Amino acid sequence: MLTSSSSFKRINSLRQLLGGLGDRGDKKNLSVMSGNEDDDNSTIDDQPFTPWIVSVASGHMLLRDPHYNKGLAFTEKERDAHYLRGLLPPAVFTPELQEKRTLHILRQYQVPLHRYIAMMDLQERNERLFYKLLVENVEELLPIVYTPTVGEACQKYGSIYRRPQGLYISLKDKGKIHDVMKNWPERNIQVIVVTDGERILGLGDLGCQGMGIPVGKLSLYTALGGVRPSVCLPVTIDVGTKNENLLKDEFYIGLKQKRATGEEYDNLLEEFMTAVKNNYGEKVLIQFEDFANHNAFDLLIKYRTSHLVFNDDIQGTACVVLGGLLSALKLIGGTLSDHTFLFLGAGEAGTGIAELISLEILKKTKATVEESRKKIWLVDSKGLLVSSRKDSLQHFKQPWAHDHAPVTGLLEAVKAIKPTILIGTSGAGKQFTKEVIEAMASINAKPLIMALSNPTSQSECTAEEAYTWSQGHAIFASGSPFDPVTYDGKEFVPGQANNAYIFPGFGLGLIMCGAIRVHDEFLLAASEALASQVTEEDYAKGIIYPRFKNIRKISAHIAAKVAARAYELGLASHLPRPSDLIKFAESCMYSLNYRNYR
């Protein structure tokens, strides 16, 4: 049998590369062969690198692997070395020109959902360009790849679904979850974001279509926190849905059955948690995302002593809000314990924030737990949480039921409690009415208004409403982004209490110190680190959160502060402790630059 000269070249090239690998014992290239292509972050970006997949990739394979594909940025030398001639147009783009072209194309789409689809297509085509584009244009693109656009994407996920981006585990997999997880191509998983789709943002039960949330969150772990994409695993646990529209939809991609509850649900989650630890070890971070209140609290309590678990809706939201409160003290004065807090919403977000505020007060004062909670009030759908309602309240609401006469509405609660800070976590839009904002402004010279519910349509009020109704006196922050507002000739820039400030850096900090459990002190450390990044320039504009354009720097500081607290408490397993934790965090981050291929 005759062999073509082209085939001889390929065989010789493969032999030389394999021979060279054997001679050097190149550990990094061995890790790349196994699929962990980003384990080379400690090397210099322009150091030649072989794009291994299973063997040396053919040009056709290389262009279809998002880990290695550079598109038109492949150099002339790389096109020759990897059989790309003729498979690409002759133009060679610099990475900067490629990014400019991609952003130009993206901006042609007027509908946010179309931009979201285009970004997801880019992620599946050229991973490094996707992250570079997102990081360098974060203020423009964050609302596209995450809230508010991701909410609409989840609602329409069945229609825009193209190919799987995560692992789907359903009731059909009962008894086989350990083996199902082995189907995921990567073996070294360090972060899992998991949802059961029951409470997606403020949009309700979206079942299997909730996968957009884990995918979006993990995109931000990489873009904002520098966690390598190869160690991230999005998971959706499908136990059915209560959403009748989805059950009637012939194109629904999930299980068409009523949502499982009780023992059946608990057993599936237990099997999943056990499988995660058996497959990936003790140090894998499991982030619970958008579980309904009754499950969110139970899962966090149940697994926080046996797994490295974090609930972004409870703990992440609490961290980012506490960070905003700590920085806001420079504008409204006093200490945290001097202020009175009123929450609209007593679910997982509201009670989670309240608990972390209480812990921070406890840490900074000599107050008892009961005293630290005394100035924190919550309103749910039935009114103010008061002692007379205690027996009928869910367990997570009971600590916040204080002695007071019953109060039914939010406006009445504002007038009775006279809060200095109003926080909305209700998931219901337009609840901070003109009368409520005016009442807050009549009580306080600078009322702090935080309308945190997502997406934008569910925000308790808009930035314009807060500034206008308070006659420009309010300090305002929201969960979803709002544009700057001009009132009485002055421009006001609203802050965004976005969890993306916290969880990417928080996760990186846990990974780099090798923690095996999440301690409350880590949460306080993350909040304090976030507050420390707000500049005097920000304060001058009434902004209580740092600019997102510096997000990787912010994440490095949060990671360093979390890791430092872990080392101080003896809860870190990666020893010895690095001398400069900020520099170490930066060195651990996924590189946004293309590697040069041999």
Image (tube, helix red, strand yellow):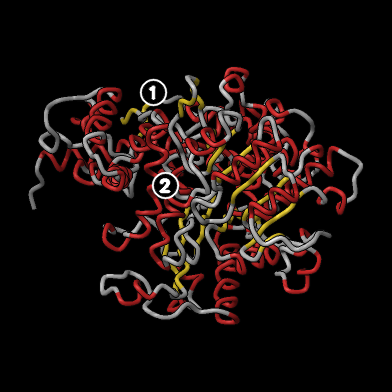
Quadrant of the drawing holding the C terminus: top left
Camera-side residue of 66 and 187:
66
Q: Residue at x 45, y 36 (%)?
A: 482
Q: Which residue is mark 1?
A: 46
Rendered image quadrant of residue 160: bottom left
Q: Is residue 9 left or right of residue 334?
A: left
Residue 569 image position (x, y, % from top left): 80, 42
Residue 338 image position (x, y, % from top left): 81, 37
Alpha-carbon distance for marks 2 and 1? 37 Å
Is residue 25 shown to the viewer in this render?
A: no
Camera-side residue of 426 and 256:
426
Amino acid type at circle 2 is: Pro
Q: Residue at x 58, y 22 (%)?
A: 538
- Which disc is residue 560 wearing? none
Residues packed near mark 1 inside 10 Å, few (<14), some (14 to 19) or many (20 plus): few
Between disc 2 and disc 1, the foreground one is 2
Instruction: Determine whether 533 is above or below 510 in the image.
Output: above
Residues packed near mark 2 inside 10 Å, few (<14), some (14 to 19) or many (20 plus): many
Specify which label sits upstream in the sequence, 2 or 1: 1
Secondary-structure class at tag 1: loop
Q: How many marks?
A: 2
Q: Is residue 247 left or right of residue 303?
A: left
Q: Residue at x 47, y 74 (%)?
A: 239
Is residue 168 shown to the viewer in this render?
A: yes
Q: Which residue is mark 2?
A: 148
Residue 201 image position (x, y, % from top left): 48, 56
Q: Residue at x 60, y 65 (%)?
A: 293
